[in-house]
């Protein structure tokens, strides 16, 4: 065995500590940051900025990995079901670890490390689920969970004396005391210790509802990346059964939507006034364009004023076509807004 591993890295405290525990034992760690529109999206958006942050703040070089197609597959039909919302945690973990297994050969590493803690998460970190994940990922015996290793049988790297088991931990449950103490011992600034909330949008009740309706609309097929990206920001409307309109609610969302240049997306905004950017995806009929223009006008600075025009086009830098933007009443807007309570 080589003193080199792949680590599943999420930027959360547990994964940071799992890497630090390995670095402390002089293990060469490839920290793979799995990213999708639902988690790690910021890293995909600006890998350099985030790479620098993790290096300067935690001394960890990250390797971003675009995991979007895997997570679309997992959400489409998880073999092991969903957690409380649309989070297929067991399938997600198995798929990440399978990817990591493939990377072992590419990187000449010998084992895989995660920041999992026994009993911390109800779905994927129960003992039986952890055993299942290890088996199904094909990593039996070469999966090391350094934060809770002392609750688990010694893995091959420990038995081969590549890793000193004595320096591994016995963390369990949801408490973070052990982890915070260790973070401080490693000199991590308290203000840079990540919050416990995981940040996976699939565990968010409201966003899960939007995403679920998108997956249902595409059954028996699957949505494309461009479809699910539109569920992660903005106000969402259905202009007809298959046509989505998303309107930004802030400058940040404007920037995010402007980055969504995919085939099939059409950008729209009210001409000559600052205001939200919209994306239409689906049937580009005159009726849908007019509806979208009315909704964009409703949520922008020109709200309630007659005689406005909307501009639209396949790229936010090339919105050259125009259409009238009628003034819309509240009832009209409500008709198209998706109901997040069901
Ligand atoms: S919370 Fe999200 S990222 Fe984490 S295992 Fe579950 S689905 Fe995957």
Image (tube, rainbow, N blue to C red):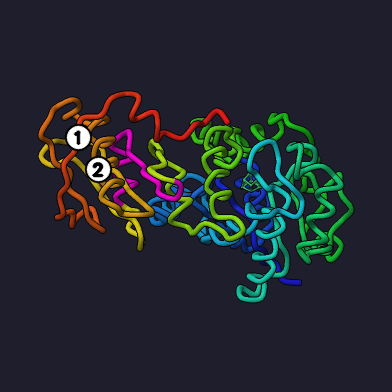
Seen at 73% across and 31% down, the residue is 174
Seen at 73% across and 65% down, the residue is 111
Q: Position of residue 342 (x, y in %)?
A: 58, 31
- The secondary structure type at the circle numbered 1 is loop
Magenta span contains residue 260: no
User: In the orientation shown, which residue stands out farthest toward the right?
Assistant: 153
Q: Position of residue 214 (x, y in %)?
A: 52, 48
- The secondary structure type at the circle numbered 2 is helix
Seen at 44% across and 50% down, the residue is 242
Q: Position of residue 156 (x, y in %)?
A: 84, 64
Q: Quadrant of residue 126?
A: top right
| Magenta residue span | 241-258
Seen at 46% across and 35% down, the residue is 338
Q: Which mark is residue 326?
A: 1
Contact between marks 1 and 2 (CB within 8 A): the answer is yes
Q: Quadrant of residue 284?
A: bottom left
Q: Is residue 288 above or below residue 274?
A: below
Which residue has dot 2 on it?
290
Q: Is residue 157 above or below residue 174?
A: below
Q: Is mark 2 within 8 Å of ligand 1?
A: no
């Amino acid at each position: 065995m080589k003193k080199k591993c792949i680590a599943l890295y999420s930027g959360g405290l547990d994964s940071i500590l799992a890497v630090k525990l390995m670095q402390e034992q002089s293990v060469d760690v490839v920290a793979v940051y799995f990213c999708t529109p639902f988690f790690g999206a910021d890293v995909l958006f600006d890998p350099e900025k985030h790479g620098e942050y993790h290096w300067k703040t935690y001394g960890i070089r990250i390797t971003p990995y675009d995991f979007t197609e895997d997570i679309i597959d997992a959400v489409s039909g998880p073999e092991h079901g969903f957690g409380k919302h649309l989070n297929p945690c067991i399938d997600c973990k198995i798929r990440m670890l399978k990817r990591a297994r493939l990377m072992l050969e590419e990187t000449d590493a010998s084992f895989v490390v995660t920041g999992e803690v026994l009993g911390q998460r109800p779905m994927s970190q129960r003992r039986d689920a952890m055993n299942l994940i290890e088996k199904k990922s094909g990593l039996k015996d070469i999966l090391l969970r350094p934060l809770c290793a002392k609750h688990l049988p010694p893995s091959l790297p420990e038995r081969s004396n590549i890793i000193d088991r004595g320096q591994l931990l016995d963390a369990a449950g949801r408490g973070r005391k052990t982890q915070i103490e260790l973070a401080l011992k490693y000199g991590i600034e308290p203000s840079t210790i990540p919050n416990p909330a995981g940040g996976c949008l699939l565990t968010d009740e409201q966003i899960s509802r939007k995403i679920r309706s998108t997956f249902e609309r595409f059954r028996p097929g699957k949505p494309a990346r461009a479809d699910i990206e539109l569920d992660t920001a903005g106000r969402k409307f259905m202009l007809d059964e298959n046509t989505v309109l998303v309107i930004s609610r802030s400058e940040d969302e404007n920037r995010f939507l402007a980055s969504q240049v995919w085939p099939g997306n059409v950008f729209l905004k009210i001409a000559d006034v600052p205001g939200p950017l919209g994306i239409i995806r689906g049937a580009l009929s005159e009726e849908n364009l007019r509806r979208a223009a009315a909704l964009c006008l409703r949520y922008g600075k020109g709200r309630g004023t007659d005689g406005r025009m909307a501009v639209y086009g396949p790229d936010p830098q090339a919105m050259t076509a125009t259409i009238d933007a009628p003034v819309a009443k509240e009832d009209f807007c409500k008709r198209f807004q998706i109901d997040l309570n069901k």
